[in-house]
Image: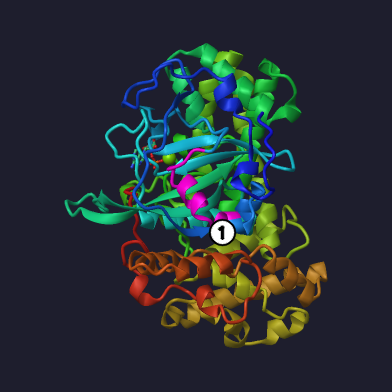
Amino acid sequence: MNYRPSTPGTLGAMIFDNRFTRELPGDPETRNTRRQVLGACYSRVKPTPVAAPRLVAHSPEAAQLLDLSEKTCTSSHFAQVFAGNRLLTGMDPYATCYGGHQFGQWAGQLGDGRAINLGEVINQRAERWVLQLKGAGPTPYARTADGLAVLRSSIREFLCSEAMFHLGVPTTRALSLVLTGEQVERDMFYDGHPRREPGAVVCRLAPSFTRFGSFQIFAARGETEVLRQLLDFTIRTDFAHLGAPSPAVYLQWFDEVCRRTAELMVHWMRVGFVHGVMNTDNMSVLGLTIDYGPYGWLEDYDLDWTPNTTDAASRRYRFGHQPQVALWNLAQLANAIYPLIEQTEPLERTLAGYQGRYQQGWQTMMARKLGLKAFVAGRDEALVDGLLSILPLVETDMTIFFRQLARLAVNNPENADAADDEALMAPLMSAYYRPEQLTAATRGRIAGWLRAYTRRVGQDGTPDEVRRRRMNAVNPTYVLRNYLAQLAIDKAEQGEFAMVADLLAVLRRPYDEQPGQEAFAEKRPDWARHRPGCSMLSCSS
Ligand code: AMP
Ligand code: MG
């Protein structure tokens, strides 16, 4: 550790304690050439300096994690550091080695191709935060790509990381978004139409960026000792509560990764988030949402929706399939750590428990979304199944539906039984994209479910006001709608960054009605239905 007397709140006051590079085997080669890196967890590599760093946005809450003041964040020194132009004393930049299954196929070595970890900061609360630049130039793991990132994908990563945090979804964080002043060429839909786009760098924060694929690469190569070192390190650093590493603790660790992953899936299903590229290299062992690429937010409730054009054919990563894919990915992680345990049975038992855990978490979450006191097994399955059968009947905005359902007055169930379908459905009408699709039969089914719901809430005896408060605490009104992110990108590409700041401000309080900000809570306008960036995204970023 290096203790230096520095003004509190400044970059110079940050204390670095770089355990990853200190305790794990590194690559002896220090030239920045693309290659297979054997027997090492990381390679030291410096960010590539850029022409003209300019801060576009920063997250005050993320800055607090590093004890940085607002004044520090808006200084030109800050932009230089988080563009990768200047290294602070104590930083020790490196890129990590990992592999992964991409779309179900083993892809071999991947690694941080354009991510460079600057070091680990210990904040005043003794928390450890790894600082990572994304888009700061190529590393030994860059393969055939350029190591850079463009403004559009950087805005998406920056805003969504912070939006997820404020929604209460486990995620890596985003400290800053800096324009590099350089242009980057991208063929957005890989169809022979490259264009030059503004380059940008995002600084991400996480206690650790270790992925399932970080373990897979050493298992695939038979590098069991490095595998053991990485797992022991991970347990000591991020799972210290499990105790000293041993085969029994490895199993407990795997159990905890399964639990955290199941919880993460429940959160994604709760808020309507579709990751888009759930490759094993994009799965955090801490159960964090990581690597915001062609993700999307569910608009109409469609379990089969995927935002990723690369996945359009097989829809492996579609909304409703995410919990299953997570389990498949966990099975790959189990295979990877097997050489350290050498017993299949306990690993299989843990994997077998995932389904039940997820199911239970999902039911509890659905009960909360509906404002029930608890999910009553044997009784509430029918209510939830009924809901899932009415949501896809016509195009229904998931976010607005749950928010508006809270407005339904249910305190007098007899009234609900008497009310005609139209009156009962009135609060929900703003959730429908095409109200003309609501035939009498469809209205009848929806109203039928609303009556069942009303009776169920009546059994709990919860006053409407209490139920509304409960529901509004888990059903957001503001999410980073795909078209809103795209509008902010369109403006930013014209040099106007106000909308990035406006969105960040609104998304800091996603559960609160914010007078004057209603436009950000509306359903997708029709022009955005098929527009690239709004409904279709690619991995090109
Ligand atoms: P992703 O699909 O974005 O998770 O990336 C898969 C792999 O490709 C990772 O190893 C990334 O670091 C790498 N990668 C993606 N984009 C670039 C880029 N522009 N330059 C270098 N490596 C990249
Ligand atoms: Mg990735």
**Residue sitting nearer the eye, 321 or 34:** 34
Please name the residue shown 79% across and 72% down the image: 466
Nearest to the observer: residue 391 or residue 170: 170
Name the outermost residue toward the left: 192
- Does the segment drawn in magenta span residue 479? no
Residue 536, position as x, y percentages in the image = 34, 59
Q: Quadrant of residue 341?
A: top right
User: In percent of the image, x 69 and y 82: which residue is there?
Assistant: 417
Q: Position of residue 36 (x, y in %)?
A: 35, 21
Does residue 109 appear in the picture of this structure? yes
Q: Is residue 300 visible?
A: no
Question: Given the image, on which type of amino acid does mark 1 rest?
Answer: Ala
| Left or right, residue 102 beside residue 455 | left
Q: Quadrant of residue 414?
A: bottom right
Span shown in magenta: 72-87
Give the residue drawn at x 51%, y 22%: 336
* Figure check: 127 above or below 422: above
**Observer-nearest residue: 71 or 539?**
71
